[in-house]
Image (cartoon, rainbow, N blue to C red):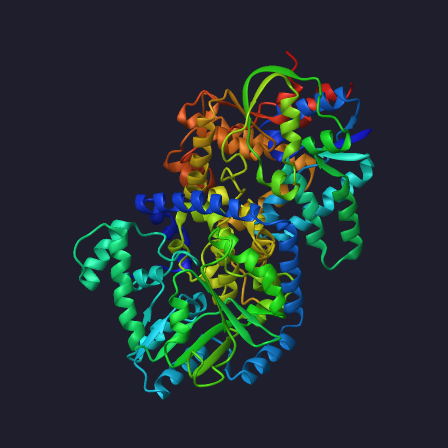
């Protein structure tokens, strides 16, 4: 399947909006997850207080990230884990690949992890003849389909039961069925075989605890537990922002994350892994490797505005709440992280030239900020990125401006710069609009006007426009109201 | 109380009745009204599209003009433009003096419903009408200024008005300024969900506090040939019949 990219977001979005299956899946997501989240947050006292505490903890970590990272690495090593540092995606992939090769392993299982999507680990492994098997049901479905996740928590949200059944029939040769239990049962049977053979298990990390060197992974299917305990070698890939100072901090974050993500009070499994087994009778792998990944994160950390991007705990609540995501789904973003947080992170990860449409693909309604468990001011970040993209900044390569838009803003800056010019401009507008008003409204425009004024054409494609009033407020004020 | 009117571009040029209604209401509550005819725009379109340089010029002009008026309060019929004034601060990260001037103006600036309920402490402005009305939360009024109860209280105190809380009242209408013409299909898709809620509420009139949302919603209702009217909160509160 051909992958879409962020550069063509507008086209991707248009195509996505034509897909009725996606449309109903997204509607279902918005309604169900919205409702479940609401009920779940009502089950704890002082939700706002929890959010404040979580954000304060994240801010503290980010201010002293170097200290906490070293503490985490030292404690993880003391517990028997091997810690690796990766500057970027190629380095991280090379580390993982070498670990697998050195062990002569060919059977690799993976649990759901956005950071391994971010570094395109599967592609890197496949290029070397290693076939990593995704073991999260949703991830396995999209792996079979040769697709990418369309949501950071529910990766196959865009697929229907029927589509999944067809996929299983074609790819793994099951009998035709639309019984969900039969479908999940066959997935379980096939994946159990893979687990039994696996020499290496690869996972992501939800939280890394500095004071103990522990990593914590949340899940609902039990596949993380198997991935991290059955194979002899466990490799965990972890963004450097995942650190929490103390085990006690989990009290807050474990209340926030599942409630925000899936509307659960707690996930079915929480795996806390501290190094390797202490003696032969313990369970678990012989080796634990933790790959700490930067990949642009220290760049985000450097700027006081963009720093808060790193507070994200990848719950996906902002996707579910976002009216734009609800219209276009995850694939339209053409990026690993979609939705509001994706529009913030991706331009910083892959550069403005590739992802410059994303920060503009928002009505700035603020629903994302309202649901964010760590109170990331996503609209503020989007505005910051828009300014950097339009105006340029000391750290960006160049500024991106469309000529027409730039001229329009120059004209606006000129006409609105004093009341006299503004009045003259509006007078000209009133003369012009006589050409296009029909029955007091401005309806859908023909070719000539559309070519001359794309914004007007875009507006009137689906809605009527209100014309300028015959007499402005300031004229009313001047003539009738001020004397009172 | 001396109130300086901040009449937003859309109200000035497209919907002047919103402005004249606001004058009517504020005079009814005993305020002294001034309107500085030099004012133009708060610069929000530039700010939201990333043109910070242009936005800053607008902010400076706005601050200078409204400082001179020296009113007790600045009141606007828009949560969005009021929120922009509160964002002026962000445009002067390298200039403490301007930041302070921006903050002072921001503190004085109010959206109409917030001003009536929280500053003047009134929920009843002696308005009366008839029919079923519902409220659409304009995003910036709701999420930047935290005005959820204020407009509802004002509407519920209009004599003869039957208030209906519609589903998803607090979900965006899809306008989003330049977003609506940069991504017209997405904007219209979001709008259609809003229209669905409005139609389901079985109302005569939809009310909101931002001319931009009303332009978006009424534009679609008009295209669909709907009988449902749209009105700004100020227009509803000005009615006495």
Give the quadrant of residue A377: bottom right
Q: Eyeballing the image, is A346 above or below A273? A: above
Residue sitting nearer the eye, A188 or B77? A188
Q: Position of residue A420 (x, y in %)?
A: 68, 35
Give the quadrant of residue B79: top right
Q: Is residue A142 left or right of residue A6?
A: left
Residue sitting nearer the eye, A14 or A484? A14
Give the quadrant of residue A193: bottom left
User: Does the rendering let one see residue A472?
Assistant: no
User: Does the rendering let one see residue A196?
Assistant: yes
Q: Eyeballing the image, is A339 above or below A117? A: above
Q: Is residue A207 left or right of residue A457?
A: right
Q: Position of residue A21 (x, y in %)?
A: 31, 46
- Image quadrant where one finds the N terminus of chain A: bottom left
Residue at 25%, 56% in the rendered image: A183
Q: Position of residue A302 (x, y in %)?
A: 63, 69
Residue at 70%, 34% in the rendered image: B114
Q: Position of residue B73 (x, y in %)?
A: 78, 35
Q: Is residue B202 left or right of residue B137?
A: left
Residue sitting nearer the eye, A151 or A458? A151
Q: Eyeballing the image, is A44 above or below B131? A: below
């Amino acid at each position: 399947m051909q992958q879409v990219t962020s550069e063509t977001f507008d086209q991707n979005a248009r195509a996505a909006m034509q897909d009725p299956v996606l449309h109903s899946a997204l509607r279902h997501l918005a309604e169900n997850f919205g409702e479940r989240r609401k009920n779940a947050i009502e089950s704890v006292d002082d939700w706002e207080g929890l959010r404040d505490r979580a954000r304060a903890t994240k801010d503290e970590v980010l201010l002293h990230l170097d200290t906490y990272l070293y503490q985490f690495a030292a404690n993880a090593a003391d517990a028997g884990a091997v810690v690796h540092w990766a500057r970027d995606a190629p380095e991280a992939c090379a580390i993982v690949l070498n670990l697998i090769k050195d062990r002569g392993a060919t059977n690799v299982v993976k649990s759901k992890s956005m950071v391994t999507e971010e570094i395109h680990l599967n592609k890197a492994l496949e290029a070397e003849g290693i076939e990593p098997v995704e073991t999260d049901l949703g991830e396995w479905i999209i792996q079979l389909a040769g697709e990418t996740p369309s949501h950071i928590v529910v990766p196959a949200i865009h697929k229907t039961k029927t589509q999944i059944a067809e996929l299983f029939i074609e790819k793994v040769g099951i009998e035709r069925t639309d019984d969900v239990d039969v479908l999940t049962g066959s997935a379980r049977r096939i994946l159990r075989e893979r687990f039994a053979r696996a020499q290496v298990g690869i996972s992501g990390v939800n939280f890394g605890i500095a004071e103990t060197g522990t990593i914590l992974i949340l899940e609902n299917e039990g596949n993380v537990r198997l991935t991290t305990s059955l194979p002899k070698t466990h490799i965990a890939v972890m963004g450097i922002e995942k650190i929490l100072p103390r085990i006690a901090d989990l009290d807050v974050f474990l209340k926030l994350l599942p409630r925000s993500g899936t509307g659960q009070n707690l996930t079915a499994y929480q795996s806390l892994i501290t190094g390797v087994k202490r003696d032969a009778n313990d369970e678990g792998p012989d080796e634990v490797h933790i790959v700490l990944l930067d990949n642009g994160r220290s760049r985000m950390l450097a700027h006081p505005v963009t720093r808060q991007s790193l507070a994200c705990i990848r719950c996906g609540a902002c996707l579910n709440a976002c009216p734009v995501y609800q219209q276009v789904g995850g694939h339209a973003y053409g990026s690993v992280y979609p939705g509001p947080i994706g529009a913030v992170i991706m331009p910083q990860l892959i550069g403005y030239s590739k992802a410059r449409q994303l920060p503009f693909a928002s009505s700035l309604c603020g629903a994302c900020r309202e649901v964010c468990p760590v109170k990331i001011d996503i609209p503020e970040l989007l505005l910051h990125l828009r300014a950097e993209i339009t105006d340029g900044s000391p750290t960006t390569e160049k500024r991106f401006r469309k000529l027409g838009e730039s001229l329009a803003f120059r004209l606006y800056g000129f006409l609105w710069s004093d009341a006299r010019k503004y009045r003259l401009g509006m007078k000209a507008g009133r003369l012009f609009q006589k050409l296009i008003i029909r029955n007091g409204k401005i309806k859908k425009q023909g070719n000539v006007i559309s070519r001359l004024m794309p914004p007007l054409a875009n507006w009137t494609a689906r809605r009527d426009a209100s014309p300028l009033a015959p007499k402005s407020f300031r004229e009313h004020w001047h003539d009738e109201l001020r004397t009172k | 109380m001396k109130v300086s009117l901040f009449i937003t571009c859309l109200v000035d040029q497209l919907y002047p009745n919103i402005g004249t209604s606001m004058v009517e209401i504020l005079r009814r509550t005993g305020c002294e009204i001034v309107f500085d005819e030099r004012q133009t725009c708060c610069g929000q379109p530039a700010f939201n599209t990333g043109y910070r340089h242009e936005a800053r010029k607008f902010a400076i002009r706005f601050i200078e003009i409204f400082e001179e008026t020296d009113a007790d309060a600045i009141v606007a019929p828009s949560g969005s433009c009021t929120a922009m004034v509160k964002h002026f601060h962000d445009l002067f990260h390298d200039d403490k003096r301007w930041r302070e001037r921006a903050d002072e103006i921001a503190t004085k600036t109010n959206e109409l419903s917030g001003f009536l309920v929280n500053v003047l402490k009134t929920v009843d402005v002696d308005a009366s009408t008839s029919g079923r009305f519902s409220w659409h939360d304009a995003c910036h009024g709701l999420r930047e200024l935290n005005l959820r109860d204020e407009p509802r209280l004002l509407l519920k105190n209009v004599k003869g008005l039957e208030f209906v809380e519609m589903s998803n009242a607090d979900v965006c209408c899809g306008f989003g300024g330049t977003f609506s013409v940069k991504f017209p299909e997405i904007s219209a898709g979001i709008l259609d969900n809003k229209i669905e809620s409005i139609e389901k509420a079985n109302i005569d009139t939809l009310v909101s506090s931002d001319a931009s949302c009303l332009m978006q919603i009424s534009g679609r209702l008009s295209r669909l040939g709907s009988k449902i009217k749209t009105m700004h909160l100020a227009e509803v509160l000005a009615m006495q019949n």
